[in-house]
Amino acid sequence: MDEEDEAARILREVFGYPQFRGEQRQIVAHLIAGGDALVLMPTGGGKSLCYQIPALARDGMGVVVSPLIALMQDQVAALREAGVRAAALNSAMSWPQVQETERRARAGELDLLYVAPERLLTERCLSLLDRCRLALVAIDEAHCVSQWGHDFRPEYLQLAVLADRYQSVPRIALTATADIATRKEMIERLRLRDPRVFVASFDRPNIRYRIAEKDTPRRQLLRFIREEHPGESGIVYCLSRASVEDTAAQLAREGIDALPYHAGLDSGTREDNQRRFIRDDGIVMVATIAFGMGIDKPDVRFVAHLDLPKSIEGYYQETGRAGRDGLPADAWMVYGLQDVVQQRRMIDQSEASAEYKRVATAKLDALLGLCETTQCRRVRLLDYFGEDSAPCGNCDNCLERPQEWDGTVAAQKLLSCIARCRSATGFGFGAQHVIDILRGNRTAKVEQFGHEGLSTFGIGADLEVAQWRSVLRQLVMLRLVEVDTERYSVLRLTAASREVLRGERAIWLRRAVDRDAVRPASRRPVDRTRVTAAQAARVLSDGSVPAADDGTHLALFETLRAWRLQVAREHGVPAYTVFHDATLEEIARRRPGSTAELRAVSGVGAVKLERYGPAVLDLVQGAQPGVTPAPAP
């Protein structure tokens, strides 16, 4: 059997999937052949299979560098449920457990070993790996190596030692988000050797992006959860620890099973709350960004932000934790002027270098552009990562056209002011100075450069400072103005701005609305009976669109979920490691009547078929019309 056939066999027999998705096949083949790789693939896109399958196909043990203990434990549990010999080495293990895992590694009894970067870099662990035959090394969450990334981990910088110590062992670095500069930095800092770079589409078509201005954020959140996601798992991100605890407490008082998570809680409480979130259904975790990296829970139905993230990378990474199973999910956010002020203050007051502050400011401005665009959110989001796309028809702006106003004159005023400032002095200025001139403010800086004499002085007094900042952010988004982050964030015009200045191009902008009038966009409940072709391919393994439901499959689906939860508790593992929701959904729709028919369901591998097949078939048979359902085993 050649390597390609062996990889397909492992995919089918071990993991239960009928075919590779996207570039998985090419990545797997490249790793099996011994090459290094950098893989950018969205959360839920199947990154783990890209190194798990080559580790099983090649001789030796695969080593996976993973940043979080909880993530290791869950991935090891999922692999063991599939019949894979997997283990982890981490600080949560007892000394006898560590010794037994090391013994199994030396004896060649492990297919995959998960290790935190801190432990991997110890001489004890490196000496252990020296005595093992290694199939490959996978570095997960590799963006942590970049100081420009949103989850920088200093210990990741030392992983370059692997390049010299294990020169013949292929290495793969994986992440869900990285701009071009970060990709280059990952390759250099990890010293990947002539790697192939695989960049999958950043699109998550099952996620509906929705952004609105803040009114009463917790009341908005409560309404959103009650009306659209009652009893479902979700994550709510807040900026401060106090906000996390207050929000979790308020949701709990309203009858929602909500838990807090932040770095200020004692480790036992954090671990207990995270364990409940991962292993139980219907938990809402309210957290700071300290929670979430590497969370592998597939059935998170929504991610909500009550405060503005720091960047589009962070926003994408956090919202990507929703809908990993490919079923419909929501990315919901409310933001206000205070969020912008607070984020800018955090940047200004940080002890970081001036260069880092300029980059952070530019990233924040890009996120604000996403918030204020009147166009398809998905198009803007993907454009940030260099990917072209068409309007999705599934974000708030596509579903409910936002209010717009003719901002052509305002744009001309602002563009003209930027140009005249530069013309008068020979160099550019930042946003506040330009706005001061437009509004006719005689600041010391304006008078220092004699800009009160410019023809644009005072011509924009009809708009408030916040309105001018909104205009500016949208012009940056439209690529009519650039922010030079290398020169103190000064503004400069692009070639495209000439069309606006000459009156050859009209500019329509998103209209600011009164806070009291704001309501979350698109309050209509998500229609879970409407499945797009792209989503159907994730739900039914043969790509067919599910037939209209008569209501009976939902009852079977809930029966299967109850059975799964009982099995998971008996095994001491998260419920989704038994079967994903998408697999149970397909079983409920197909109603397989035999082992062969159940085997054809995506996500049912050979070991799970043998272990759980009889019980599942009994439940399906018991749910047939006119048949009394059998109790869950």
Image (tube, grey):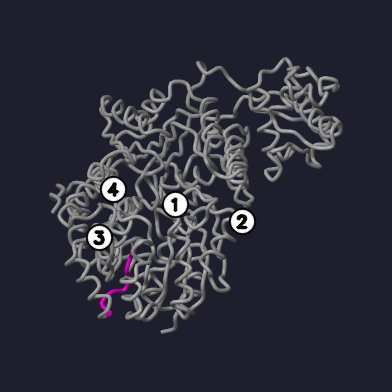
> In the image shown, does 15 or 433 lie closer to the viewer?
433
Which stretch appears magenta?
108-115
Q: Which residue is mark 3?
A: 593
Label 2, label 3: how far apart the Cα atoms are = 50 Å
Amino acid at circle 1? Ala
The disc at residue 180 is: 2
Amino acid at circle 4? Ile
Precedes in sequence: disc 1 or disc 2: 2
The disc at residue 536 is: 1
Residue 293, compared with residue 460, is above or below; it is below
> In the image shown, does 336 or 333 lie closer to the viewer?
336
Outermost bottom residue: 1
Amino acid at circle 2? Ile
- Residue 423 at what x, y percent from top left? 86, 34
Left or right, residue 633 beside residue 135: left
- Residue 93 at what x, y percent from top left? 22, 60
Left or right, residue 117 beside residue 104: right
**In front: label 3 or label 4:** 4
> In the image shown, does 392 or 73 lie closer to the viewer?
73
The reply to whether discs 3 and 4 touch (Cβ–Cβ < 8 Å) is no
Label 4, label 2: how far apart the Cα atoms are = 33 Å
